[in-house]
């Protein structure tokens, strides 16, 4: 199983390996630059797929392209809240969540693809505006993640940039499995 599978119920056990792997994907790159790429990358990643392709899981028990996009949109909502809590509050708790439960209960894969892409682009734009406005001391402010401990705004930005890479590559992999590869992931 990939370290990026992030299995529900084992988040505490795999947190260090998961976060290390995300940070390694980012390397020395500017996380803000990576985060800014997603709104333009997503339309290219879903272009040319039929509705059936978008909704077809990669394999039994795996997500479809549309479910991945739904996850990215919800993750953006979660992180937008986390960033704001950390900047506005003093060491607030950061709640984790079960992504598989969210996928099932929030009906991932049922939404219109174009609507999801547009919603995510708008949310990401708002998040980027906030992050670009923060002073260095604000980027160092921390919250306490229930599974991973203290995390600064800057650290969460790096994790989210790596998270974007993981899911962009996942969509490219799913497409390739359907015989519809994309040049950029």
Image: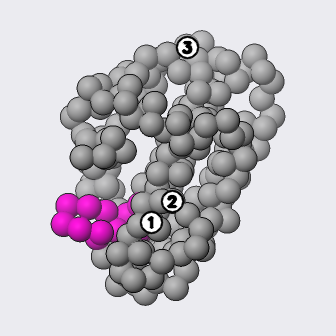
The secondary structure that most of the magenta stretch takes on is loop
**Does residue 137 appear to the left or right of 25 in the view shown?**
right
The structure residue drawn at horizontal position 71% and vertical position 39%, both measured from the top left corner, is 30
Looking at the rendered image, the disc whose residue lies closer to the viewer, 3 or 1, is: 1
Distance from the alpha carbon under mark 1 to that under mark 2 = 5 Å
Distance from the alpha carbon under mark 2 to that under mark 3 = 31 Å
**Does residue 175 appear to the left or right of 28 in the view shown?**
left
How many marks the image carries: the answer is: 3
- Residue 89: tell me if it is visible: no
- Please report the bounds of the magenta region as a residue range: 57-68
Q: Helix or strand or loop: what does disc 1 sit on? A: helix
Q: Residue 20 location, x and y as percent?
A: 46, 30
Residue occupied by mark 3: 91
Residue occupied by mark 1: 171
Q: Residue 32 location, x and y as percent?
A: 71, 42
Residue occupied by mark 2: 168
Dot 1 and dot 2 residues touching (CB under 8 Å): yes
């Amino acid at each position: 199983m990939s370290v990026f599978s992030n299995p529900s119920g084992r988040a505490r056990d795999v947190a260090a390996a998961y976060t290390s792997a995300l940070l390694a994907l980012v390397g020395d790159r500017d996380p803000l630059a990576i985060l800014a790429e997603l709104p333009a990358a997503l339309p290219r990643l879903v272009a040319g797929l039929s509705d059936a392709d978008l909704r077809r899981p990669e394999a039994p028990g795996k997500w479809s392209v549309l479910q991945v996009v739904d996850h990215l949109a919800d993750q953006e909502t979660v992180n937008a809240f986390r960033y704001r809590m950390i900047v506005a509050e003093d060491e607030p708790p950061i709640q984790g969540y079960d992504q598989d439960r969210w996928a099932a209960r929030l009906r991932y894969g049922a939404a219109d693809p174009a609507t999801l892409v547009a919603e995510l682009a708008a949310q990401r734009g708002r998040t980027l505006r906030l992050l670009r406005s923060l002073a260095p001391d604000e980027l160092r402010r921390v919250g306490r993640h229930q599974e991973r401990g203290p995390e600064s705004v800057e650290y969460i930005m790096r994790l989210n940039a790596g998270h974007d890479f993981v899911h962009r590559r996942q969509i490219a992999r799913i497409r390739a499995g359907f015989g519809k590869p994309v040049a950029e992931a």
